[in-house]
Image (cartoon, helix red, strand yellow):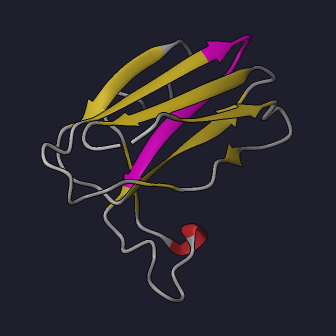
């Protein structure tokens, strides 16, 4: 999978949430790299889901999101990974006037 990159900026007026980034749960090994680069002051959380994100009627707002244990309420540049299958990831910019650049790279066939 080619890298997916999304940037969220200025959550001083309230949290901002990216669109879900679907992952290929059938790739083996599933290994997915997650990196967040912070500019300025920003607090962010990376989340993942096991929901069937392509099902009719599924919406991100009603999805079952799990906070990544190493990327929750962070304020500095960090990276981590998902070593087991999930169906999608997203980033939540919780607060701050700065920005968070979220990069997702999944191993496997391009």
For the N terminus, the image quarter is: top left
> Which is nearer the eye, 37 or 108?
108
**Is 81 drawn above or below residue 28 in the view shown?**
above
> Which is nearer the eye, 84 or 13?
84
Q: Is residue 25 left or right of residue 87?
A: left
Query: Residue at (54%, 12%) from the top-left corner?
Result: 76
**Is 41 drawn above or below residue 71 in the view shown?**
above
Count of numbered tags: 0
Q: Is residue 92 left or right of residue 1?
A: right
Furthest-right residue in view? 13
**Residue 17 pos. (x, y %):** 65, 49
Quarter-wise, where is residue 105 in the image?
Answer: top left
Query: Residue at (72%, 23%) from the top-left corner?
Result: 99
Query: Residue at (74%, 10%) from the top-left corner?
Result: 40
**Is 91 drawn above or below residue 102 in the view shown?**
below
Query: Residue at (29%, 31%) from the top-left corner?
Result: 81
Q: Which range is magenta?
A: 38-48
For the C terminus, the image quarter is: top left
**Is 77 drawn above or below residue 61 in the view shown?**
above
Magenta segment includes 45: yes
**Residue 11 pos. (x, y %):** 78, 35
**Residue 67 pos. (x, y %):** 39, 45
Q: Main secondary structure of the magenta part?
A: strand
Quarter-wise, where is residue 60 in the image?
Answer: bottom right
């Amino acid at each position: 999978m080619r890298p997916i990159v999304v940037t969220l900026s200025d959550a001083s007026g309230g949290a901002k949430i990216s669109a879900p980034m679907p992952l290929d749960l059938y790739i083996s090994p599933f290994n997915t790299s997650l990196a967040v680069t912070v500019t300025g002051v920003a607090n962010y959380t990376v989340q993942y889901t096991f929901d069937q994100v392509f099902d009719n009627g599924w919406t991100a707002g009603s999805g079952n999101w799990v906070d990544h244990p190493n990327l929750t309420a962070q304020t500095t540049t960090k990276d981590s990974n998902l070593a087991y299958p999930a169906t999608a990831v997203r980033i939540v910019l919780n607060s701050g006037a700065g920005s968070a650049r979220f990069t997702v790279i999944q191993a496997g066939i391009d």
